[in-house]
Amino acid sequence: MIKNYIKIAFRSLLKTKALSAIHIFGLAVAIAASTLLYLTAMFELSFDNFHKNREQVGLIYTESHPQNGVRRSATVSTPLAPLLKSSFPEMEYVSRYMNSGIILRNGDKQLEASNKYVDADFLSIFSFTMLHGNVAALNDLNNVVIDESMADNLFGSSNIVGKQVEVYQNGRWESKNITAVISKNPKNSSLTFNTLLRFEHKPNYQATIDNWSHEDHNIFVKLKSGAINDEAFTQKAKAFVDLYYKEESDMRKRDGWGTDKNGAYVALHLLPLAKYHRNDLDIGQGSAPIFPWILLIIAGLILFIACSNFINLSLANSFARNREIGTRKTLGGTTLQLMLQLWTESFLLCLLATCIGIGLAWVLLAQYNAIMNYSLSISQLLSPVNLAFFSLTLLLLTLLSGGYPAWRIAKANIIQTLKGKASIKSSGLRNSLTVLQFSIAIVLILATIIISFQLRYIADRPLGFDKTEVISIPIGEGIDHENALQQMRVALAAQPWVKSVSASDMNLGRGRDGSMSTSRMGFDFEGKQVYTNFMRIDFDYLETLGIKLLEGRDFDRSHPSDTASVIINTQMAAQLGGADKVLGKTIEIDGNPQVIGIIDDFNFQDLRRKVEPLTLSINPNIFSVSYLFVRVKTDNLSESMTKLEAIWKKINPKANIAASYLDENTQNMYRDEQRFVQIVVSGAVVAIAISCLGLFALALLMINKRIKEIGIRKVLGSSVMQIVVLLSKEFMKLMLLAFVLACPLAWWMMNAWLRGFAYRIDIQWWMFVAAGLLTIGIALTTIAWQTLRAATSNPVDSLRDE
């Protein structure tokens, strides 16, 4: 019997080739889009899953409540980690974690490496694959752990435990023992590095060993047993905070800060590792927490639209099969048998669409990876979990999209079906599905408009510095940074295409080296606790970056004492009591420098955050510069970049050139948003395209039902335009209803998204009007051919009954 069902199903599909093609095309496109979104979401959700007992691993962060909101920071001070390990016996392992660049050398071979300064417990907390060596590899201060790529490039083999490698750090070469080689970091690892060195080797370690105000690294812990429980840890850590954060808590109380629900001015928290890749802390790690779930929702909505189309198309085609259904019933076919026959056809359509859809996803995957900066693979679908999921999805698609039409068609009246006049009264369902389809499409169109304008606003908004015509160069390792700056100044002094040169310890935006960081410290000023971001700069920084000086003066080479001076921004001046009060005074940070100037606020961080207090210093003993900034003339930027790279290569021959334009750096801070808008735009296009197929089906269904009415109206004198308006009016009502339903939902969703930006656009009424007009225009274009064909048809053909 099943064999006959399949044979008849194939005949039926071949008989209605055009309709079958629409069925398969709509579902296949939806499945292809959903597959790509599913792979992306699963990749995002898989981050750090490979670590054993990851539920026991967490990140320490602090929470406080300044007068303008909540501050959560995972950047902590050097003394904290040892005290945590000695104070909390349930913490089996504790490790600090700090980013740095170093250079490795073996003979004549020399390579830059992404290094992390960690404690000996690090390899016991995380489950990176150990190719050679063991978790005790960092027990000695003189040891180094490297990954297999560095081992192969430097030694030609990964089996190098026991060998020595030279490491350039803190301005000198040191010989280290290689005690372990690990595999390359998995693509779904939030923690990425080439080498691991003991934390005690970090720059300025001795100066910060007892300094609670200098925060520059993170702390990971692993519990002896049980999953991370943040609330329980915060409660237990209250006594610890009262002891070691008492001075800070007292100052915040004095300054009018708020408290958390437990009455604490400072609280310690534990972020589970599962949330590390998608967090809202200050470490700039990964994507927004909601990002993968939005992808899954969009994928589900696209599949819903495709299923709705399938139902509408099946019902639209039911009139062509009235006599077939009536004949089968007359010959003894039961409702169940007819349903099974029709369901088999639906299953074959869904199976074909699924195969074509996955094949289409495979074809598009390379381009998708290139555009979205991913490295996904269709082979990820072959896991038992994913195979089971897709099999279940195919079954649900078949049941949902084919089950209802099969049931309604099979239950039709025998006499009416034999006469070809059976009427399946389901217009309410069809109209509802169409309204929902276009509501989804309108929401996606509105999201596209609003996100695009927000990103354009971010790109065009004045940042307080001139980002055009400036090239940023990471100095890298293997060369004295201060000396490199001076050599670069000398080399560029006679170049007519160079306007000015300066440097800083941090980049602005995210450069080609992937960097984006700040340093922060706190101090007491006239009985008030003050926090500031701290930046080491060099002479001509304000000129090179086009930053406006409001009060006082800039750093001047003719004033040797300026190394013991600072310039602050307006936000910092406000913290200290105002420009008039603070100019010329000393502040209690390293060296007790004097404030000689006040600059206008500029966005040295991304626009998700408001401008924070900032202090600028040219003191080389605090931090070394890490980035060169060169302002060039606009005649030929690409030529200037080429010349600049050539000059830099002469100064630092072994440098990995990673120069970048500063305006591009600022845009790179919003990679996730740019990726998000591309996905939403693609989703909107797919949703609209598939919705239009459904609308085409609904137009076909309605016109077929009203064909005699149209003929009578034409005989009675109705014009073509009157009939077109009559037929289009019903669809206009559906579109308007979809618009009314979509607007509040889109407004709520996009307002929630925009709240993540300190600087944002206002949602305008015209955005909704534009989305509505675009949707209605597309809808009317879709049904235009059907309505015109019906309005211009010969009424004799439509009124003839035999």
Image: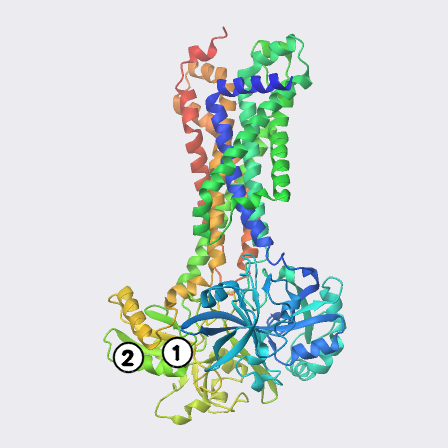
- Residue density around tag 2, few if under 14, some if 14–19, many if 20 or more, within 10 Å: some
Query: Can I make out residue 546 in this image?
Result: no
Q: Can you give x and y, in whole percent of width and height, for residue 620 in the image?
A: 44, 86
Q: In this image, 484 relative to 533: left or right?
A: left
Q: Gap in Å between the C-alphas at discs 1 and 2?
A: 15 Å
Asked where in the image residue 206 lies, by quadrant, the reply is bottom right
Counting residues from the start of the chain, the first of labels 1 and 2 encountered is 2
778 left or right, relative to 757: left
In this view, which residue lies farthest toward the top?
802
Residue 33 drawn above or below residue 670:
above
Disc 1 marks a residue whose amino acid type is Ala
Quadrant where the image shows the N terminus: top right
Decide if residue 448 is in sight here.
yes
Task: Say which element carries label 1.
Answer: strand
Q: Secondary structure at mark 2?
A: helix
Please say which color scheme the image uses. rainbow
Q: Nearer the viewer, mark 1 or mark 2?
A: 2
Query: Would you call the spot at circle 1 few (<14 residues within 10 Å), some (14-19), or many (20 or more)?
Result: many
The relative height of residue 634 versus residue 788 in the rendered view (above or below) is: below
Return the x and y of residue 403 as percentages of the image width and height. 63, 27
**Where is 603 relative to 678, above or below?**
below
Question: Which residue is label 2 attached to?
Answer: 491
| Label ID, residue 65 | none
In percent of width and height, residue 705 lies at 52, 19
Nearer to us in this view, 21 or 484: 484
Residue receiving disc 1: 503
Kindly identify the amino acid type of the residue bearing the numbered disc 2.
Answer: Ala
Residue 508 pos. (x, y %):
43, 71
